[in-house]
Image: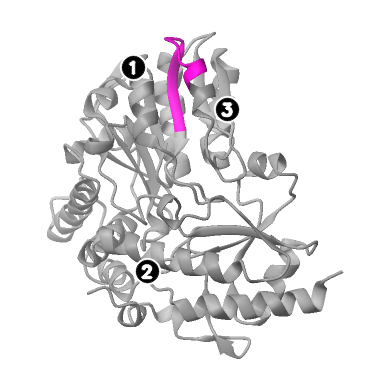
Amino acid sequence: MFNTTQIRQDFPILHQQINGKPFVYLDSTASSQKPLCVIEAMNDFYRQYNANVHRGIYQISEKASAAYENARKKVGRFINARSWRELIFTRNATESINLVAYSWGQTNLKAGDVIITTEMEHHANLVPWQQLAARTGAVVKYIPVNEQGQLDLAMFDQWLTPSVKLVAVTHMSNVLGVIPPVEEIIKKAHSVGALVLLDGAQSVPHMPVDVQALNCDFLAFSSHKMLGPTGLGVLWARQDILTAMPPFMTGGDMIKQVTLKGCTWNDLPWKFEAGTPAIAEAIGLGVAVDYLSKLGMANVRQHEIEMTGYALERLSQVEGLHIYGPFDPLIRGGAISFTLGDIHPHDVAAVLDGEGIAVRAGHHCAMPIHDKFGLPATTRASFYVYNLPEEIDRLVIGLDKARELLAI
């Protein structure tokens, strides 16, 4: 059974007061909190078997290596990868996308080729493609988005020609919450020979993701958004693509042999993991994956649908509040961006902080979609496995207070 009250007991950070009031954390889209089991697993590594991986033949190094690689296999099973060799550990989803842009992109793109993305992307899925286009002469096109977050797929269809080499799209928007029809997008992209990269930073933590069923070519996501530690990301890609790609960085552990005349690369996945990796963080992510798997990702998604539906209903009752993105919780995730009259989002967030409520205010690393709506910023509340409906009620009370204090 998915028991949120019981789940909350696993998160020490939630059991405190902020400004004398019970802490309400509504910023999981930026970074999730960590269950005690993840914290303890990382502490146990540092206390019991802290050693570098892949290099030592002594006992604790072998134990560390096994734990590190076991975490990789757990993550592979979590997204139903065909092989653990398709999982590359990076620093974050941003580095995963940059790895693709530099390694695959610079090898395969030339002047006149087309990259298609959307207007609602996180900067991490925009800027790498803009920079790649500047280096190669390729062109970036952006699928238009309406206020509800729906993509103009007619325009996408119009642009689809053999010149399109890559389609890079979010699997769940961090601003509008929308879940695009990625299955349809992938099928259409493949029909003209283009590869597809999904930014799964928001989707992988919040709903079942099966890379084989999706049939995408690349998937990028981050540990810290799915109950794991910061400083670790994942790139999944089809093994044949990774095999053909040159390394992103060079140095220790990604080589097989080095002479003064040259070198040969290590096998997958280590070809893309230069230097000492984030060992404790990988172990922590493996435990986070165990925790989410025990909850059941279908249950995680159902909880989010219920929380989002309740939040949309309650927030709609706040005078002067405008919500961006779809109002159907079945086609969106639990990130709700809004404005409250003419009050600046930073001021709204400051009042809420005084009430012990943590939300995000700003452009959320997605300036183009804010520019499209003529907004300098929005306030965003987001939910995860440890949030309760009564915390939404607290949010609404806090927003009413902000309106009363700051309304012009």
* For residue 289, above or below residue 240: below
* Residue 266 falls left or right of residue 109: left
Please tell me which of labels 3 and 1 falls first in the chain.
3
Residue 182 in view in this figure: yes
Mark 1 neighbour class, 10 Å CA radius: few under 14, some 14 to 19, many 20 or more: few
Please tell me which of labels 2 and 3 falls first in the chain.
3
Residue at horizontal 26%, vertical 53%?
Answer: 52
Residue type at mark 1? Ser
Magenta range is: 157-168
Quarter of the rendering occupied by the N terminus = bottom left
x and y percentages locating residue 201 in the rendered image:
42, 48
Please tell me which of labels 1 and 2 falls first in the chain.
1
Q: Which residue is mark 3?
A: 142
> Is residue 167 covered in magenta?
yes
Q: Which residue is mark 2?
A: 385
Tell me how the rendering is colored: one colour
Residue furthest to the bottom? 20
x and y percentages locating residue 171 in the rendered image:
42, 42
Quarter of the rendering occupied by the C terminus = bottom right
x and y percentages locating residue 342 in the rendered image:
80, 61
Q: Which residue is mark 1?
A: 191
> CA–CA distance between discs 2 and 3?
33 Å
